[in-house]
Amino acid sequence: MHFNEQGADFKYLITNEKDKRFGLCVNAVGFQAIKAGSAYPPRNHPEEYYFTTQKGRTLHEYQLVYITKGKGTFSSESTPEQEVSKGQLLVLFPDEWHTYAPSTKTGWNEYYIGFEGEIANMLMQENFLTKEKQVLDIGINEELVSLFRRALDIAEADRTASQQYLSGIAMHIIGCLLSITQNKLYEEMDNAAQKIESAKIIMQENIFKEIDAEELSAKLGLSYSWFRKVFKEYTGYSPAKYFQELKLRKAKQMLIESPLTIKEICYELNYTSAEHFFTVFKKQTGYTPTEYRNIGRGVKADINEEHSL
């Protein structure tokens, strides 16, 4: 175990053939508290791990780097440079160039664990962790920190079968990450779903009026670009298209159930003109409004009625 004036401890491990047959082995585990303005990374790492932030590096293992204080930047072959901050975790992939560093204004605290093996490869091949999402929003999680610290303790003790113990901790960390990120995703989806459901209710309640999607998004406190994107993901329609589908559904109901003329239905639903209503209805259903009404009511169509909309 190494210590320096910045507050760091780390351990690089030697693995044998038996360790490798276990399916997953840990090569490195560590913690570094980098003060604002300090050089990064500290120079007392092995040559194959040391790098300059300008040139970056390529590892031959997976690494998970958890930032618990401060902020900085990260980039890789798969991820354009972006800011990272406390509560985020970096996923580094073998044989992929990357670089990262704390801000000189804030420094940062980082925990990391490096591992390799068939199990690790399988997890990545099955997209449990992917290059498309190398920066994970974890938040500050005490359980995760405890796992990293426990790994440091086991690495320092270096007892028999410690490698297998460390491999179990690495798997626990990965499982913890998946649980946290998936649950955060569902929470975000739940919040988004509530907004979309609110929008759908507003549309239902204003079916006889005209709704501007941008005004609706503003009413819900959302940016229009986000609202339109998420609305389409949830419903399969853009907001404007969904509203038109609601109008069409209501038109079908009114054609069969109400005594109103087609012109009156068109007026009630705020279509721009009877001709526009006829065109939209025919395009969407394959029937004219009169044909649909007569089919729904079980009577023969009067071919002349369509001309007296």
Image (cartoon, rainbow, N blue to C red):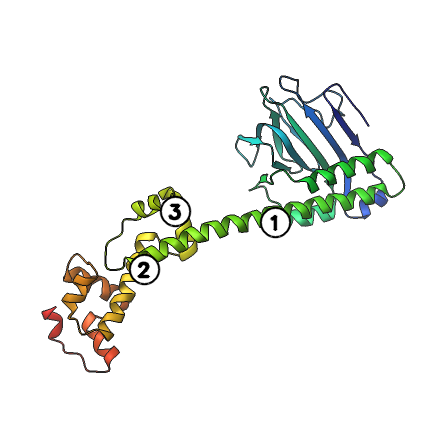
- Which residue is at 79% across, 31% downward? 11
Q: Nearer the viewer, residue 1 or 206?
A: 206
Residue 30: quarter of image: top right
Q: Residue flagged by tag 1: what amino acid is it?
A: Asn
Q: Secondary structure at mark 1?
A: loop
Q: Earlier in the sequence, mark 3 or mark 2?
A: 2
For discs 1 and 3, the disc positioned in front in the rendered view: 3
How far separated are the C-alphas under marks 3 and 2? Answer: 17 Å
Q: Tell whether label 2 touches label 3 (CB within 8 Å).
A: no
Q: Nearer the viewer, residue 254 or 116?
A: 254
Residue 36: quarter of image: top right
Q: Which mark is residue 204?
A: 2
Residue 67 appears anywhere in the view: yes
Q: Residues within 10 Å of mark 1 (few under 14, many from 20)?
A: few
Where is mark 3, residue-wise? Answer: 227
**Side (left or right) of 63 relative to 152:** left
